Amino acid sequence: MPSISFLSQIALDLGSENTYVLLDDKSPVYRCASCVLLDAHKEGTVYAAGDEARHMDGRTGEDTLLFSPIQYGGVADSELAAMLLLSAIEKASGRRRGLDKSRLVFAIPDGATRVERAALAQAAQLAGAKRTLLVKAPLAAAIELKKHVERAEAQLMVSIGAQVTEVCVMSGCGIALSRHMKTGSAAFDAAIVEYIRKKHELVISSLLADEIKRDLGTAVAPATEITQTLSGRSVRTGKPVTVQLSSQEIYEALSAPVEALIGAICDALYHVPADCSGDILKNGICLTGGGSELFGLAERLGEDTQLEIHHSIHPSFDAVKGAYQIAQDDKMVRALTNAYSAYEI
Ligand SMILES: Nc1ncnc2c1ncn2[C@@H]1O[C@H](COP(=O)(O)OP(=O)(O)OP(=O)(O)O)[C@@H](O)[C@H]1O
Ligand SMILES: [Mg+2]
């Protein structure tokens, strides 16, 4: 087996909504949509991957199909996931490149099953990688947040992605307790679509709902009212119409799913072993994942749990950046592998 030092390391986080790539510690994190545009009639024909696919969707009629090879954090189709990751690496590198001299390092959900891990490893192999390392994303994110590791103290990590939320208690290099929930920020988009359909009788896409969530969305009552003009299709007439939308309305639209998400996180906290409570009170919660960027969500979580919340400026980059750091440290890889927090393939 070749020594790792001869291989370049490429860190990846294949999320349900976004794919993140980090080529080295001097480059910025590359991000693209986790989707491919397929020919609806010819199996295996892929027209585009990543953001290009997302932008072409809806403009090519019924002959194409937008498909996400990653669903609920797991690989749903290894061949298409291989195409997606190859395309993302090429775009991040700015050139076509073979992966025969690379080790791919993936941040994976803690709740990834053996089958999902095998499907991801297969995707890496199909993409041409000779070696693959899978590391648990919550640990990777904690390392990026400089909160962990190899310390005996328990550390609580809450990761909110688009389709997956995980609450993990880490202890040393292992995960002592975890709860994996198939919900995340995409539930906020669905709530916005539904609210606007009911209140304004307007049909909007989930992509537009995502934009509204970023611009007007809030998990706490808005201190000042922001409004935005919104265009969509009338439910009744089918014609395009515009309406005024306010941050107060989006706060109302999001109140049920925000409460459900925070409730699920708090419920997971009740199951934390009593022995860890002291450490958690002292260390607070590390909040990570793009879904945690919803305005006011960290504040709400802090209020509801009475714990201090720590997070980075770009929480969606934490896992891929931490995975890259882990890959540089052979001792850390061994320690995580021994604790079943990393898998070398
Ligand atoms: N500023 C923001 N305000 C609100 N939501 C945001 C913001 N930035 C990103 N998000 C949301 O974060 C989600 C994407 O997060 P992330 O990229 O971590 O998910 P993912 O890794 O693709 O999904 P998963 O981990 O569930 O498989 C999206 O639903 C997006 O709308
Ligand atoms: Mg993710």
Image (tube, rainbow, N blue to C red):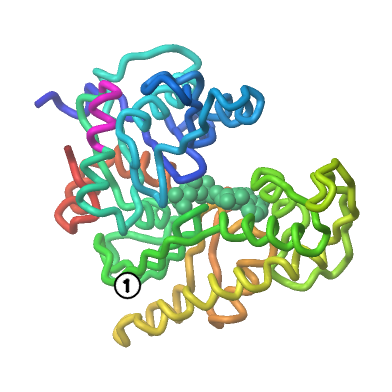
> Which residue position holds label 1?
153
- Where residue 54 appears, x then y in whole percent? 58, 31
Residue 125 magenta: yes
Is the C terminus in the top left, top right, bottom left or bottom right quadrant?
Answer: top left
- Name which residue lies at 48% across and 79% down: 266
Magenta segment's dominant SS is: helix
Label 1 CA crowd tier, 10 Å (few <14, some 14–19, many 20+)? some
Residue shown at 41% from the left, 57% from the top: 142
Q: Name which quarter of the figure residue 223 lies in.
A: bottom right
> Relative to 305, is 4 on the left or the right?
left
Query: From the image, which quarter does the N terminus lie in?
Result: top left
Which residue is farthest left?
A: 1
Residue extent of the magenta highlight: 121-128
Asked if the stretch drawn in magenta spans residue 283, the answer is: no
Question: Which of the pair 302/290 is nearer the observer?
Answer: 290
Q: Position of residue 274 (x, y in %)?
A: 32, 87
Residue at point 33% right, 68% down? 178
Residue 79 figure quarter: top left
Residue 164, image x, y percentages = 44, 57
- Is residue 219 placed above or below 96 in the rendered structure? below
The answer to whether residue 317 of the structure is visible from this angle is no
Q: Is residue 48 above or below residue 73?
A: above
Q: Nearer the viewer, residue 111 or 3?
A: 111
Q: Amino acid at mark 1?
A: Glu
